[in-house]
Amino acid sequence: MASLVLLLLILLVPTLSLPAAHCNDNVGFQLKLTHVDAGTSYTKLQLLSRAIARSKARVAALQSAAVLPPVVDPITAARVLVTASSGEYLVDLAIGTPPLYYTAIMDTGSDLIWTQCAPCLLCADQPTPYFDVKKSATYRALPCRSSRCASLSSPSCFKKMCVYQYYYGDTASTAGVLANETFTFGAANSTKVRATNIAFGCGSLNAGDLANSSGMVGFGRGPLSLVSQLGPSRFSYCLTSYLSATPSRLYFGVYANLSSTNTSSGSPVQSTPFVINPALPNMYFLSLKAISLGTKLLPIDPLVFAINDDGTGGVIIDSGTSITWLQQDAYEAVRRGLVSAIPLPAMNDTDIGLDTCFQWPPPPNVTVTVPDLVFHFDSANMTLLPENYMLIASTTGYLCLVMAPTGVGTIIGNYQQQNLHLLYDIGNSFLSFVPAPCDII
């Protein structure tokens, strides 16, 4: 397969020289984050059902990535952590000189920045034209011996050009030439930021669902992610609720700051360190110690949240996974806690794939108080209000826990991150967060 890709690229990729690369310091900008289902007429229940379906393949890929076999071929070696088809939020940016504007999936679970390039032998549908490198004055293919080529998990070489292959689970892939290019960032009514010599994948062989976008922007911890390449290694985002007409926001560099966040709750900013998983060093792992419902600490062995010797397990925070997937033992403890706290008949809902539900609405003589759920991290407590982890669907007659069980590992999804302003400080290796009305900040 690898030799076939190289053969196909012979006719597709022009050979251009490489200028000296440099890093842009003190960069700052903000972008609009648009949910992939924004502007549709789906109900909250339908939105959640679609999001759960997208997340299942992503979770499977995340859990399998740590136990891939040793490097045996470029396809296996280049396999990354997520499925491109499960992107949840889109950003607008521009590539090249003159700039070609396009929309891409923003993803904290991967590193590579890539878009589809012309001529394209095999490409997925996208809403904008393919990027034509011949029309850009700043495109430069990277040589095989460049440090950025060496940053790929398994680089290949053709005619002294660096060739990449990334496989996103079983449903999407991209292959082409690693190159340098100028990118432009900034909302329509804000100052534009131009960043030169950004390494990206110029994909000529691509497959999968791009969620009505034209590529991907990786925000992971690896050297090829956007946040690593631009230098000011910090970004933040504030996700509005699924039904909000207001887009979410992404802040980068000097704009990523929680000190001025408008929070009606008066809650302080809290911080918890990232944890390095040697098997998955580019992912954002956290140290989760315990979970409580209201004032009750749930009986969960802390070892269920630990990273195993083989790299499996642990706790990841991820923008591209919709709901939180709890390790099985932790999930069962949360389920038992809710059954004890909510005086309603428990039921299993199969319509949208949620397993812990209660009959709703309650009888007139029954008062239901759903407790807050708290994730107790190392040095920080993340409190989730009921609307951040429960779904009330009165039209269909149930109240459901918006989490699901997994065999190994825990992934904190974006449903639980709604109306939290989260700051990823990669330089200092910690995550900070504070409750915030994300539709007005």
Image (cartoon, rainbow, N blue to C red):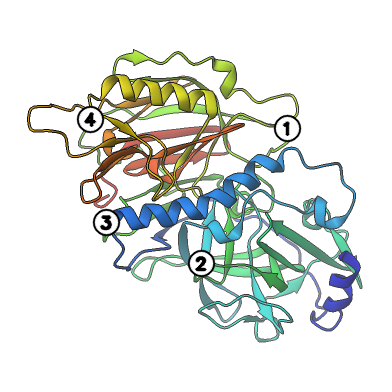
Q: Where is residue 234 in the image (x, y as percent from the top left)?
A: 51, 44
Query: What amino acid is found at the position of numbered circle 2 in the picture?
Result: Ala
User: 199 or 59, which is in the foreground?
Assistant: 59
Q: Nearer the viewer, mark 1 or mark 4?
A: 1
Give percent across and percent down for residue 288.
Answer: 51, 24
The residue where tag 4 is placed is: 266
Residue bearing mark 2:
211
| Residue 281, above or below 333 | below
Tell me what residue is drawn at x 32 percent, y 68 percent.
39
Residue 375 visible from this viewpoint:
no
In the rendered structure, which disc, 1 or 4, sits on the residue that comes first in sequence? 4
The disc, 3 or 2, on the residue closer to the chain's N-terminal end is 2
| Nearest the eye: 330 or 234 | 330
The secondary element bearing badge 4 is classed as loop
Q: Between residue 82 and residue 186, name the one nearer to us.
A: 82
Identify residue type, mark 1: Pro
Q: What residue type is labelled 4?
A: Gly
Q: Mark 3 points at which residue?
A: 244
Image location (x, y in percent) of residue 228 = 62, 49
The Cα–Cα distance between marks 4 and 2, rounded to whole angstroms, is 37 Å
Look at the picture and state if 341 lies above or below 345. above
Judging from the image, what secondary structure is the residue with disc 1 in? loop
Upstream in sequence: badge 2 or badge 1: 2
Of labels 4 and 2, earlier in sequence is 2
Marking on residue 278: 1
Q: In this view, does 429 lie to the left or right of 186?
A: right
